[in-house]
Image (cartoon, grey):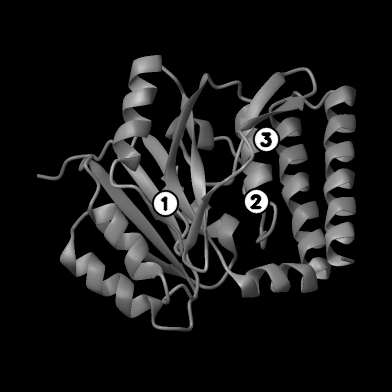
């Protein structure tokens, strides 16, 4: 007889062999044991597959799904489709988490009767840790009020809020904003946990790559916002003020990308 896990951890994997084992080990050490880890191998060409297979054989809570390379958004969508848990947590394949990460997020959600819980994170830059300086900020959304926004990870959200989300095709940049906005528009009850429980790895190469990939990032960003607009139309909430808000936010992000690439 199989039992349904309470939490599903979604891990998109693409050529992450350098740090994947550390990521998975941090999950296996969790003080909260009632979870499943859905690893979506997004067409990796390195030895990520071998690492995933090893850990899948090592711990039955890890489940591996393979697909052709379609980008992070589609990998997350695949993960959620195969998730059995009532709660969804994201962890990126080159990041890692504190041993009590799931326990504290889940306990906070239960205590506050929240639909989503956000926490803070450390930045791991070439092995040097520092607390992310910015506090979790509330982004103002037209006709909605304010909604906390952090990176795609660092939170736990009830799975039911993902059921209406539209995932953008071939979206590898800006998918966090696209998904977060669609969840925010469903008006979940939010709780902020002021603890640093997630370790976000930054690479020197990725910073340079981000500046050089602006012509790939902008189309990806546009696809993400198109998904939000489609969501609004489908939910019959696409008011003129909301449309103006989304267009202004998209334009601001594009200008910021161009400015950063020119530095």
Which mark sits nearer the N-terminus, 2 or 3?
2
| Crowdedness near tag 2: few (<14), some (14–19) or many (≥20) residues, C-alpha within 10 Å | many
**Dot 1: what SS?**
strand
The quadrant in which the C terminus is found is bottom right
Question: Toward the viewer: 131 or 165?
Answer: 131
Let me know if residue 90 appears in the view.
Answer: no
Residue 54 position in % (x across, y down):
24, 73
| Crowdedness near tag 1: few (<14), some (14–19) or many (≥20) residues, C-alpha within 10 Å | many
Does residue 12 lie above or below 151 as drawn? below
Q: CA distance from mark 2 to mark 3?
A: 10 Å
Does residue 171 lie above or below 146 as drawn? below
Left or right of 212, for residue 30: left
Left or right of 88, for residue 166: right
Q: Residue at x 48, y 83 (%)?
A: 45
Tell me the residue that label 1 is attached to.
10
Residue 63 position in % (x across, y down):
29, 59
Q: CA distance from mark 1 to mark 3?
A: 19 Å
Question: Toward the viewer: 152 or 69?
Answer: 152
| Crowdedness near tag 3: few (<14), some (14–19) or many (≥20) residues, C-alpha within 10 Å | many
Residue 2 position in % (x across, y down):
14, 45
Which mark sits nearer the N-terminus, 1 or 3?
1
Tell me the residue that label 3 is attached to.
181
Residue 22: name its quadrant.
bottom left
Does residue 164 lie above or below 171 as drawn? above
Q: Residue at x 28, y 61 (%)?
A: 25
Q: Residue at x 33, y 69 (%)?
A: 21
Tell me the residue that label 2 is attached to.
175
The quadrant in which the N terminus is found is top left
Q: Residue at x 81, y 67 (%)?
A: 214
């Amino acid at each position: 007889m199989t039992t349904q896990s309470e939490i599903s951890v979604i891990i998109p994997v693409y050529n992450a062999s350098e740090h994947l084992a550390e990521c998975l080990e941090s999950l296996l050490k969790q003080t909260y044991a009632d979870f499943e880890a859905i690893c979506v191998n997004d067409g990796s060409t390195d030895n990520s597959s071998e690492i995933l297979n090893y850990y899948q054989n090592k711990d039955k809570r890890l489940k591996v799904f393979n697909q052709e390379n379609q980008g992070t958004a589609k990998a997350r969508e695949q993960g959620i489709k195969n998730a059995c848990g009532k709660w969804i947590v994201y962890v990126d394949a080159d990041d890692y988490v504190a041993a009590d990460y799931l326990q504290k997020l889940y306990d906070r959600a239960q205590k506050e009767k929240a639909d989503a819980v956000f926490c803070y994170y450390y930045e791991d830059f070439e092995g040097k840790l520092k607390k992310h300086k910015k506090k979790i900020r509330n982004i103002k959304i037209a006709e909605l009020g304010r909604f906390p926004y952090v990176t795609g990870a660092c939170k736990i959200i009830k799975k039911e809020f993902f059921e209406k989300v539209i995932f953008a095709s071939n979206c590898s940049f800006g998918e966090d904003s696209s998904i977060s906005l669609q969840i925010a528009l469903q008006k979940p009850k939010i709780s902020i946990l002021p603890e640093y429980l997630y370790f976000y790895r930054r690479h020197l190469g990725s910073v340079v790559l981000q500046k050089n990939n602006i012509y790939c990032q902008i189309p990806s960003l546009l696809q993400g916002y198109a998904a939000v607009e489609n969501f609004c139309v489908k939910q019959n909430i696409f008011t003129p003020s909301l449309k103006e808000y989304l267009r202004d936010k998209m334009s601001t992000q594009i200008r910021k990308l161009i400015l950063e690439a020119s530095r």
